[in-house]
Amino acid sequence: MALASRARALLPGARSWGAVLARVTAQRAMSHRVVVETDAAAGVAVMKFRNPPVNSLSLEMVTELVINLEKLENDKTVRGLIFTSESPGVFSSGLNLLDMYGRNPAHYAEYWKAVQELWLRLYQCPMVTVATINGACPAGGCLISMTCDYRVMADNPKYTIGLNETQLGIVAPFWFKDTLVNTIGYRASEISLQLGLLYPPAEALRVGIVDKVVPEDQVHSAALAVMAQWLAIPDHARQLTKAMLRKPTVDNLVRQRDADIQQFVSFISRDSIQKGLQMYLQMLKQKKA
Ligand SMILES: CCCCCC/C=C/CC(=O)SCCNC(=O)CCNC(=O)[C@H](O)C(C)(C)COP(=O)(O)OP(=O)(O)OC[C@H]1O[C@@H](n2cnc3c(N)ncnc32)[C@H](O)[C@@H]1OP(=O)(O)O
């Protein structure tokens, strides 16, 4: 889909293409939540998350990620893409709780459509994708990293990774679950997802949710080394193989996208879920205090 239609699909509130452009431009002018640095000679881009304080995946951040991904996919000189956080400490705190709490159904639907779009684009990305996990990586942050072809995590016991949704009283959607099962296998997913486990680096490596753990100061060089190894494979062969492996999982969401949005809206709008999110947000504040 062209950038224009993608932007329009992601920003359904906008009535015309001009309005879409104005809104996206305004967002970008206000802040760049995503910074892309491209090494054209190496054919590698680095996408850095910059959404303080904790790189939560707000609607604006998700939209910027999708737009930047589409741009890079259209740039034939870029074969590999590394994701990381501009500020070590938090890779991404996951979906923005404030996009899921205290808003109206239209907002929830718009948000969920954008999150689906991001996952679909990342999971089918033709570039080699490597996540450089240089901080905490719960829930939606973990999902983003699991869409990558390879995950390198910094060896810092303060950093954890996993799908912790049940700990918030919410249920990870089937496509989060599918991504986890594809990454760590069925039995490990049963334990991991029901308990909402967050793994420190050594355990993350043992369960296979990351592929490599390295000292923190080597995390970027390690990601570049992995990238070089993957880029040695001819693109067409690797891309078709990736598509073959991931197509059934992608098709599963594509078939039921609208139903999944309806389900999300009805689930997240429940009083009991809203109450749970409110308590979780309070808990985060108290922890800080
Ligand atoms: C049928 C479908 C069902 C729906 C399924 C939806 C699935 C959801 C997936 C998700 O991604 S939900 C989000 C889950 N994320 C988390 O549980 C992480 C929560 N955050 C943390 O654990 C910590 O913040 C951190 C990431 C480890 C960082 O810790 P740090 O000490 O550095 O920072 P804090 O003081 O805790 O936080 C600073 C500031 O940010 C706010 N915040 C943290 N996480 C989020 C978030 N995900 N969304 C929005 N805001 C977040 C936190 O409340 C603090 O705010 P203030 O107190 O400064 O106002």
Image (cartoon, helix red, strand yellow):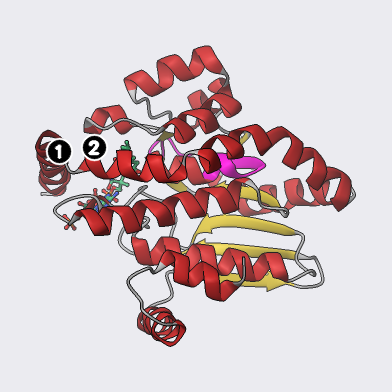
Residue 88 point in image, percent of width and height: 44, 55
Query: What is the magenta range?
Result: 145-160
Residue 38 position (above or below residue 215) = below
CA neighbours of label 1 inside 10 A, class few (<14), some (14 to 19), many (20+): few
**Disc 2 designates what residue?**
267
Residue 216 point in image, percent of width and height: 54, 46
Residue 120 point in image, percent of width and height: 56, 49
CA neighbours of label 2 inside 10 A, class few (<14), some (14 to 19), many (20+): some
- Which residue appears at 57% of the width and 55% of the height? 83
Is residue 34 visible in this depiction of the protein? no
Location of the N terminus by quadrant is: bottom right
- Which residue appears at 45% of the width and 83% of the height? 21
Choose between 174 and 34: the one closer to the eye.
174
**Is there a contact, CB below 8 Å, between mark 2 and mark 1?**
yes
Element carrying mark 2: helix
Res 39 label: none
Res 270 label: 1
Residue 35 position (above or below residue 87) = below
Answer yes or no: disc 2 within 8 Å of ligand 1.
yes
Estimate the spatial distance between the alpha carbons at disc 2 and disc 1, rounded to whole Å.
6 Å
Q: Amino acid at mark 2?
A: Phe
Left or right of 108, for residue 11: right
Q: Amino acid at mark 1?
A: Arg
Choose between 37 and 259: the one closer to the eye.
259
Element carrying mark 1: loop
Residue 170 position (above or below residue 83) = above
Choose between 34 and 243: the one closer to the eye.
243
